Image (cartoon, helix red, strand yellow):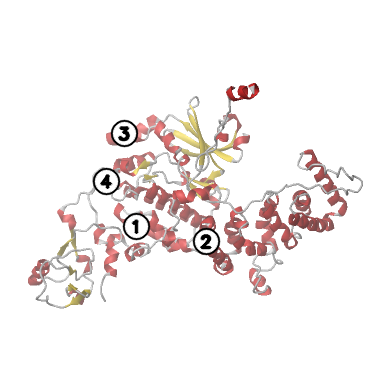
Amino acid sequence: MLEALRRFYSPPKLRVIVIVPMGNGSSECLAEPIDPQLLRGGIVNNKTFLYEVAVYHTSQRTYSRCSVLKFTRVDRENECGAKLNDRPKLRFCLEKNFQITGLLKNASIPIKCRHPCILRVDRSFPDPVANSLFLVTESCLPLSVFLENLEADDVLLGSRSILRALSFLHDKLSLSHNNLRSSSVFVDYRSMWKLGGFEYALPFVEMNANVIELLEVLNNSSDDNAFQYDKEYPFCYDIYLYSKFICEVSKKIGTDEFAGFTQVLQNSCMHSQPRARLPPSQLLSHHVFQHPLVLASEFLENYMMHSDSDKEEFFREFEKNVAGRLPVETLCKKILPKCFENNVFLDYPCQELISRLLHPSADLTLTDCKRTSNTAMRIFICQSTFKTHLLPLVLGKFRLRERQTRMILLENFSGYSHILSVSDLRDTVLPEVCIGVYDFYEPLSSLSLCCLGALSKTLGANETLNVLRSTEISLYRDHKLSSPVANAKSPLKTKPLWPRAHLFSEAGPKMGRQQRDIPFSEERKMVNRTRLTLAQLATLSPNYQPDLNSKLRAIPTDDDGTAELRESARKITTSEHKKMNQSLAIPLIKINSGAGTYCEGKGELPSEMSPEDDIISPVGLGSVDVRLDEVVNNSSKKEPFGTGEIRSESPSVPGDGWEDAWNIDD
């Protein structure tokens, strides 16, 4: 009794609980600071008047799979002062928005926001002694390393990736990047372009013409079109930088595949008037992004968000819509590696495609492969292509000890085993198959024994059995296997048991970290499926000329980008419509009746109409409100068509000039 009371009233032991944040937060295990002595292979990526940026990898074990961006402070105030001489507004803007402390703080913005097209930053470590900042990012390299070897497919996927990142920043965060250049774009291990370089980022409410002029001066740019700013279109500077960047990259690769898209960027997005520039969400609907490569990549990147029926339809039509419309080299480099990712590789709708990929045909051309294979099981990968592009992925899957993954590889082992070299079979495949023999899961153990017999024919029984025995010894040494316990009642009658253990994990398709963050960072509705008006679609045409749009005429603006709309600027003349058929100048009367609204084209006005009734303009300006007395006065003056003026009171948006053409009643 006393002992029980003593235990009850005794003070509790101190318990230490370690909380590791999950989700978008970074893990506490990354709290180890960066050791500058272990940084290797620095690539200087950017130089400014206040800092330099270099990309490193490190031999530090904690960050061995990451990249490190080092921001080093430099002193070039004299150079900066010479550029801003006799410009007090720009000097004030520099001191207010772009001091070194604020720039380094902005560089850490990606820590708090997650998007698959934005460079992932896990941690930041300031170093006050060395006046530097370290950013631990995902494994990447600057785009400048690859500029000389870019292909058209890389530019197509990369331009879409950067455009998606801008759309997220503008629509979700109301943030202007202000630094979209080649030094701000990075390439990850999957050759995917990621947006970084957030040092000059500002909220939309803090943007003005002085900020843009300052950034252009500091970057040694003298393009007058970039200086224009309009607060009603705060995305205008980012979209201008994006257009300039994509046009420069397209010229380097020397291809005409993006001629239509770059023409839109030059005509509209690099226009002197910010009102003529198109937002990123609208540019994403351009037909260049309806390419099979883009559609397939988008589907596989957002694979876990699709329903099972969509997945089955995608893989059912894979050969027709994807493999049949892409070169084999592009298919194997850009699409098939995504099919070997865990969330796709282990999913049931993808199993038929994986089985076909693991049974490559002889070294024939793609046309011969399709002709010789049957309809139900067409093979579109040759052995040489498999060995070059897919074999490294298969060997990587063998190093992953997951039950379902290993069973898929072993079930199709006969389809690709003859392609593997003896060194691959001996060093990678054989040790992993021997481990599967000792697994407790019966189907996996049986498949491992079958593959072990196939390996013994190639490598020899002696070497196969030696590896099997050494595998057993190592498993005992690592305490993964325990000695079998004999029956104590009748030890003589008990047969020795084969040692078994649960050596392979059981896991299904899971969402990666990037994909878990997608629902919180962007809408599930694909941007390519958004509906645009006819006027917005017209602005995506390479033949669209913003200068011919009367509503996009030059409007004076203040320094903060506020438009000064004078009375003369509000009047829209119809002189641009002189070439239209004068037969279209008949007033179209919109009559409201009980059955609905319809239009009549007559030379005179009905007697029952009043001056307050709406009249559709004879020139087809759907957004223009015309009064009846103005039409009567114009007709009494008998002026030729196209010389009068029509007042516009409704706000205009990019593309309204083209919308007029669609509103003409034939």
On the question of residue 58 being in view, the answer is no
- Quarter of the rendering containing residue 51: top left
Please name which of the two marks, 2 or 1, marks the residue nearer to the observer: 2
Q: CA distance from mark 2 to mark 3?
A: 55 Å
Q: What is the number of the mark on residue 561?
A: 4
- First of labels 4, 1 by sequence position: 1
Which residue corresponds to the image point at 50% horizontal and 44% vertical from the top-left? 119
- First of labels 3, 4 by sequence position: 3
544 up-or-down from 31: above or below:
below
Q: Is residue 594 left or right of residue 268?
A: left
Look at mark 2 in the image and give the residue it sits on. Answer: 307
Please name which of the two marks, 3 or 4, marks the residue nearer to the observer: 4
For label 4, the SS is: loop
Q: Is residue 13 left or right of residue 483?
A: left
Residue 367 versus residue 113: which sits nearer the camera? Answer: 113
Q: Position of residue 487 (x, y in %)?
A: 86, 45
Q: Dot 4, how many residues are within 10 Å of its Cα: few (below 14), some (14-19), or many (20+)?
A: many
User: Which amino acid, by three-letter code, is at mark 4?
Assistant: Gly
- First of labels 2, 4 by sequence position: 2
Q: What is the number of the mark on residue 329?
A: none
- First of labels 3, 1 by sequence position: 3
65 up-or-down from 291: above or below:
above
User: Which amino acid, by three-letter code, is at mark 1?
Assistant: Ser
Look at mark 3 in the image and give the residue it sits on. Answer: 91
For label 2, the SS is: loop
581 up-or-down from 177: above or below:
below
Look at mark 1 in the image and give the residue it sits on. Answer: 268
